[in-house]
Amino acid sequence: MGAAACLAATSGMRPFPTPPTRDELCTVKMSFQGLEFIAPTYGHVFWWETIAWWPHLADRQAAYAAKRAAGDTHIILDLSGSYKELGEEYDEVGADYSQNLPALVALAEEAIREGFLIDLRLAGDGQGAGPGYNDPVGMTYGHDWLMANFPRIAAAFAHLVDYTVFVTGYDGCFYGWEPEQMVAFGKLFRSIFPTGTLGTEFNTGHIPLGEGPGYRDAYGPNGCMQDFDVIYGEFDPFNYHADSTWQIVGRLVSPYVRPDDQPAGDDPHPPYLLHTPNVRGPWFFIAFEILTYRWVRGQCAPDEIPAYRSYFATMGCAHIC
């Protein structure tokens, strides 16, 4: 189990905070890039946003403290994951809780008692039915595996549903899943958690679901994305001053303010897709993964993080990680 087998004692018996409102739960604020601190085991860390890989309580406490100081409200837990491209000890090990859900639940309870809401990544990136990983580097399982296993995951987290944004995976979900697979998982989720909070992440330039017959108006009344609540976006870490940013943000925020460097004739009137709330309330778009690839590799200059946040805020993004 890696980290899951080594979990240290949790945060005492602090009471759970009052459950958040839907708006508070969907307003995801975390340092997916830009946070660095000293962890007792790992030393200087360019923070990759998950405590699920950290088996030692002292390291997790260092992360909690750094996140509080940054004003973060949410923390990611990976059902299964790794980032073996980086070479850091905790990235190389990762953690897989898919067959040890009580350990992941205990970690979630600890984080909630520490004052954080949970962003639970469900290891559904890409295609795969298990039992092995579809991506050994990222330790993910894929869509069909998640469809088969989500009912038991949901049962384990049922008492934490009011504190948890359930997220299909990372940017390997769209593109990565077929449109009908996205719809199918949304329906499965709603059959278990009618009022729960569900999110998904898209990779650079690809809003789910906007293409193909039957998938137009996905966010309109009775649209095929109605079972989702939070849409997380990835952007090009080497050039976010680009069409793959402007075309996407212009459709997911209102009012959209064209940045000075967007050509005047470039898509002058992008349609706003999230204008009609779903049955649970308004949609939430999170500008999520922007410089992360470079940040965790120590490739970002100190001024790049505030510069990208300012750029996305100028365009009208209210929620920026």
Image: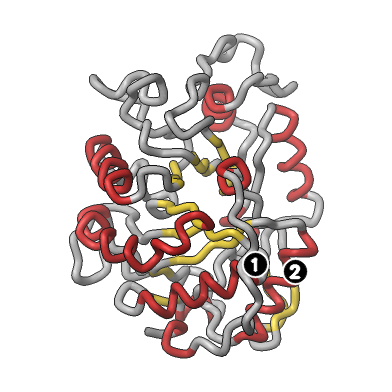
Badge 1 density bin: few <14, some 14–19, many ≥20, Cα 10 Å: many
| Residue denoted by label 2 | 66
- The location of residue 278, given as percent across then percent down, is 44, 28
* Residue drawn at (33%, 22%) of the image: 222
Total marks in image = 2
User: What element does badge 1 sit on?
Assistant: loop
Work out whether residue 259 or residue 166 is closer to the camera in this orientation and state it. Answer: 166
The residue shown at (62%, 85%) is 57
**123 relative to 80, above or below:** above
Q: Is residue 105 above or below residue 116?
A: below
Could you tell me the amino acid type at mark 1?
Trp
Disc 1 target residue: 47
Q: Is residue 237 visible?
A: no
Q: Nearer the viewer, residue 190 or 128?
A: 190
Residue name at image x 65 percent, y 50 percent:
29
What residue do we see at 20% from left, 59% from top?
A: 148
Could you tell me which quadrant the N terminus lies in?
bottom left
Question: Is label 2 in a helix, a strand or a loop?
Answer: helix
- CB within 8 Å, label 2 to label 1: yes
Residues at marks 2 and 1, CA–CA distance in whole angstroms: 10 Å
Q: Is residue 254 above or below residue 112?
A: above
Pick whichever of labels 2 and 1 is earlier in the sequence: 1
Q: x and y percent of residue 234 in the render? A: 52, 44
The quadrant where residue 153 appears: bottom left
Kindly identify the amino acid type of the residue bearing the numbered disc 2: Ala
